[in-house]
Amino acid sequence: MFDITAGKLIKFIEKTLLAIIAVLTIIATFQEILNIYNIGKVNLADLLLIFIYTEVLGMIGVFYTSNRIPITLPLFIAMTAIARLIILQGKGMEASTLLYEAGAILIIAIACLAVRYRPNRTYHYQDDDDKK
């Protein structure tokens, strides 16, 4: 009667949660734009937050079209979030904290380069073609 496998159920839950995240991200974006309008001033931290929301929506869009999330998208979001954190902390932050946060951005950027320029070899894990 109902042919629901665990894989189909998990895929349905995953797509439902991503749709909820997309809707909430759109709501948060409009709330941020309304906040900027009410204050009457746009700050770089506000722009970076809207950029993060845009990247999250882009990541969800890529997943819906390809059923995959490129690892670089969350890494870009992380770099933007750390940059926003540095801006929000202002000029009064300790130099060592700034160096640690800038170092984190550098490490993530190197990870992006490593992932992007990896060898084009494909690896098969328990592929049906490998059965003898």
Image (tube, rainbow, N blue to C red):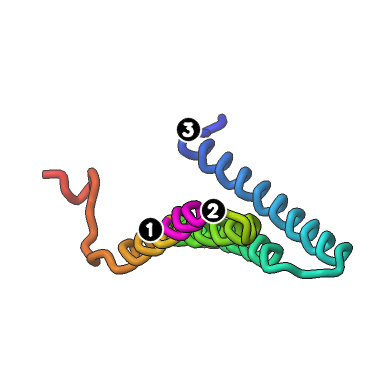
Magenta-tinted stretch = 95-103
Residue 24 screen position, x and y as percent: 71, 50
Q: Amino acid at mark 2?
A: Glu
Give the residue type that dot 1 points to: Ile
Callout 3 touching callout 1 (CB < 8 Å): no
Tag nearer the camera, 3 or 2: 2
The residue at 22%/54% (across/down) is 123
Which dot, 2 or 1, sits closer to the camera?
2
Q: Residue at x 40, y 63 (%)?
A: 109
Considering only vertical position in the picture, is 73 above or below 130? below
Circle 3 — which element? helix
Horizontal side of residue 126 vs 29, given as left or right: left
Which of the image's four quarters has the N terminus? top right
Q: Is residue 25 visible?
A: yes
In the rendered image, which residue does mark 3 sit on? 6
For label 3, count other residues whose C-alpha is less than 10 Å away and answer few (under 14), some (14-19) or many (20+): few
Q: Nearer the viewer, residue 37 or 27?
A: 37
Q: Residue farthest to the top?
A: 1
Dominant SS in magenta: helix
Q: Is residue 113 magenta?
A: no
Residue at the spot 77% in from the left edge and 69% down from the top edge: 42
> Which residue carries the number 1 mark?
107
Provide the secondary structure element on which disc 2 rests: loop
Residue 4 placement (x, y as % from top left): 52, 33
Q: Position of residue 79 (x, y in %)?
A: 50, 60
Q: Disc 3 to disc 2, how far (Cα)?
A: 50 Å
Q: Which residue is mark 2?
A: 94
If the image is split into quadrants, where does the C terminus sit?
A: top left
In the shown orientation, is residue 47 left or right of residue 15? right
**Alpha-carbon neighbours of circle 1 within 10 Å: few (<14), some, or many (≥20)?**
few
